[in-house]
Image: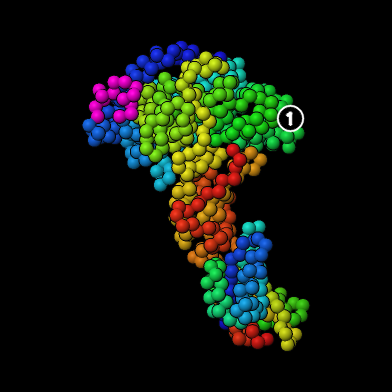
Amino acid sequence: MIFDEKHECMPLEQLHDLQLERLKAVVRMVYEKVPHYKRVFDEKGLRPEDIKTLDDLEKIPFTSKNDLRDNYPFGMLAVPLEGVAEIHASSGTTGNPTVVAYTKNDIKLWAHVMARTIACAGGTPNDIIQNAYGYGLFTGGLGFHYGAIELGASVVPTSSGQTKRQLKLIQDFGSTVLTCTPSYSIYMAEEALDAGIDPRKTSIRLGILGAEPWSDGMRKDIEEKWDMSACDIYGLSEIIGPGVAVECPAKDGLHLFSDHFLPEIVNPDTGERLPDGEKGELVLTTLTKEALPLLRFRIGDITSINHQRCEGCGRTMPRMSKIFGRTDDMLIIRGINVFPSQIEGVLLSIEGAEPHYMIVVDRERGLDRLELQVEVSRKLFTDEVKGLEALRQKITDEIESVLGLRVIVRLVEPQTIERSMGKAKRVIDKRRI
Amino acid sequence: MKIQQISLFLENTSGRLVDALSLLSEADVNIRALSLSDTSDFGILRLIVNDVEKAHRILAEKHYTVLKSDVVAVEVEDRPGALVGILRILKNAGINVEYTYAFVERSADRAILIFRFDDVEKGIEALEGEEVTMLSSDEVLSR
């Protein structure tokens, strides 16, 4: 089912006209309403009227995550706070989280692109969608929630966790669509088997999975375990949350809703735009958002793009490949973005701790596990077990409060963590994604 | 009377104990008593040695997390009830024992108990009041 056929299948020429018209409008708006953009344009001697074609987009400087942090909390908003209907935030590297805000129209847009997303993956108004993405500041939960309602489906807002209850509700309600991270879907299937429930025999027929990288191998495994179709979804809170791109059942790239979010692929080192098919950093410009419009936002995800019409579903929305990796050292653990620098910040806030640590990421029964190895310096050492246990607990708690993620802290002897000459190697990622 | 003990942080993996103790044996440091507390990840090795300064220096040079701490050595007769007698004194004085370990003397029918109290000074005070024999480092090493 195509939720918005008019736009999703729009002939390319018309689509370009629509994008250009929207681009001109958003450029004019941010120049007028967001001091950051006025300054950036003025510094370059660029005027909104200089954007006459879609290619002129290249003249506009990039926006980075730092620009959002520097303007914390509301400096990047294009509307006064009275116009804001909902505010989300993601955890911050240096103390300040990244704030994203939505007007009432933005929420309508979010519901709309999410209804498109669910339908594109194969969902219908008849489905019962069990939404096991986290509800709260994380945009995954509410994004799916709004989209399911807009589509006309039924949503069961279980949020993440409480796996036994999830399984009971799948059985009792006859849920047909499961939305969560791919790793949680594996964990849930394994818990089901342990409890004597065959996930293949449940009513679940479709999984819309995302918020973390996963491979086609993992997809095969998940589809096998659940006897369902599993589609990949892509999004990020700065742009809107989930609802940026999603696979159709052909599973040949993720359709990116470019009538609202204009994509470019650039060389991460030079910033130069790359042609279709070449791998580079994804850059997005929001064309229709009101509260937090962003021009050429650098995401840090590496992908490629294909503008050809999809043979499978007929959509003209361009397709991005699954994410190949990151331009920085960001890790995605159980759907949560983690920068090693955040962990380092927490460690250094503990008296006596030194920045000698190692992050080891692994996947156990489909669930990401982050082990933080911390060297016990002489300053941290007490000769009683309870003192060291208290230290371990303190590090665990502080990290949880900053990242919203429970990690496993292991105390190790000094000098066991390799000292490298150049850039310290802080992360060992053992996950086979 | 306090004596000094060496405490060492060790990961709970095979070979860590022998690596650390080899350093001491090569340096001719003799161990009079030891105790090892373990958790699933790490352990704390506590040692009474004949040369605290040397042991500390050697381990620190090899980047071990090591510290000197004060403990109390109590001499008791090696017979049933001797340890309980000491513990009652501590209990009555409200002193908490963080850990303890014991060994017997070479030349007499007596044992030596090593105590770490939550409050070392108060512990010593309580034991002194009851005329318990506390030993100096030299005494611990010679008996």
Q: Nearer the viewer, residue A240 or A310?
A: A310
Q: Is residue A330 visible?
A: yes
**Left or right for A283, reference A170:** left
Q: Position of residue A386 (x, y in %)?
A: 59, 62
Amino acid type of the residue tagged 1 in the rendering: Asp
Residue stretch in magenta = A46-59
Q: Nearer the viewer, residue B110 or A228?
A: A228
**Left or right for A138, reference B55:** left
**A317 w.r.t. B122: above or below:** above
Q: Position of residue B103 (x, y in %)?
A: 70, 78
**Left or right for A362, reference A302:** right
Residue A226 belongs to magenta span: no
Residue A56 belongs to magenta span: yes
Seen from this angle, which residue lies furthest right? B80
Residue located beneath label 1 in the image: A198
Q: Nearer the viewer, residue A254 or B47?
A: A254
